[in-house]
Amino acid sequence: KNDIVSKISSYRDPFDSVSWQMIQKIPRQASVTATLSFLAELSQRKSVYSFLSVLQGIQGLSWKPLQELPDMSYALLDLEDPWIWFWMDYEPQNVRSRMHNFFFNQDWIVKDAFGDIILLEKGKGEKLVEPIRAPVGELLGKSVVIDDGFQLLNVYMGSDRLGRRGALPLTFEWKSVKDLHEDYQMILLLQKEGRNIYAHSRRIGYSILPTSLWPKDTYLKDRYWFPLPPLGRGEYNLIMTFYNRHTGKQADVSLWGSRGVQEGNILQIGMVKVP
């Protein structure tokens, strides 16, 4: 019993550690909006806004209508916060419109990221998620098709060496080949010597622009910082598969040609090397 208690007491969730690090990167005098899990840590700051209130279109606890977005310099967000999805389901048209206005009508760029935990700041540069006119390059070609509804055109790995926090930057380029009305989940897997070492799930497009909001011929660039556990030395295959969140079924992955797809609708996308 004591051994179990000591193990629980000594356990540190890497997401908690990363969240604390991100908070320290926000200047104390800067204005910031945040999802609920971060508001307590930020509560002593002068200019703090609830991201949930932004989505609801209200002025905090006053419930007065929010006529325009306050001037915010930073945003610390858990994009899988269940309250985001609650309000998107409860009031989909208005909340999605406010979500679009927040992310695409302001100059937000990524300052730090770890999975679905994102720190944004105002500036010029690459967005977390952004529509694109056409893909650049063809690492995978135009042949990877998921459920005959959308295509994975490219995958770029930012580095084959792990960063200081064990986050592997990945960039995906997508195209919808028909109107999509369902959300899809991506399962990222690390394999070593044919064995599954680690699996991680994420929603394509985050809660910002999930696949259910993609009309036909949407081109999208989607960046993700894949959180990894401590890994021993060696080489790991990075593979992915897809699930339809509405049906709960694994998606069919087809490839025009023979390159890249394995049995079981799994796509190998690269190699992670740990020195």
Image (cartoon, rainbow, N blue to C red):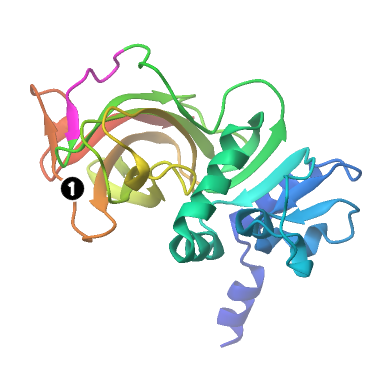
Considering the numbered disc 1 on the image, is that residue within a helix, a strand or a loop? loop
Specify the farthest residue to the left. Answer: 257
Image position of 267 with respect to 243: above or below? above
Q: Horizontal and vertical percent for residue 209?
A: 44, 42
Q: Is residue 51 magenta?
A: no
Q: Horizontal and vertical percent for residue 128?
A: 54, 33
Between residues 221 and 88, which one lies in front from this camera angle?
88
Q: Horizontal and vertical percent for residue 13?
A: 60, 60
Between residues 137 and 97, which one lies in front from this camera angle?
97
Q: Horizontal and vertical percent for residue 219?
A: 35, 26
Please give the name of the residue rendered at 56% of the width and 80% of the height, measured from the top-left corner.
4
Q: Quadrant of residue 204?
A: top left
Between residues 69 and 183, which one lies in front from this camera angle?
69
102 on left or right of 273: right
Q: Residues within 10 Å of mark 1 (few under 14, many from 20)?
A: many
Q: Which residues are magenta?
A: 138-145
Q: Main secondary structure of the magenta part?
A: loop
Image position of 264 with respect to 124: above or below? below
Please give the name of the residue rendered at 39% of the width and 48% of the height, measured from the top-left corner.
203
Amino acid bearing label 1? Ala
Please give the name of the residue rendered at 86% of the width and 51% of the height, measured from the top-left corner.
47
Residue 249 visible to the viewer: yes
Image quadrant in which the N terminus is located: bottom right
Q: Which residue is mark 1?
A: 251
Image position of 178 with respect to 76: above or below? above
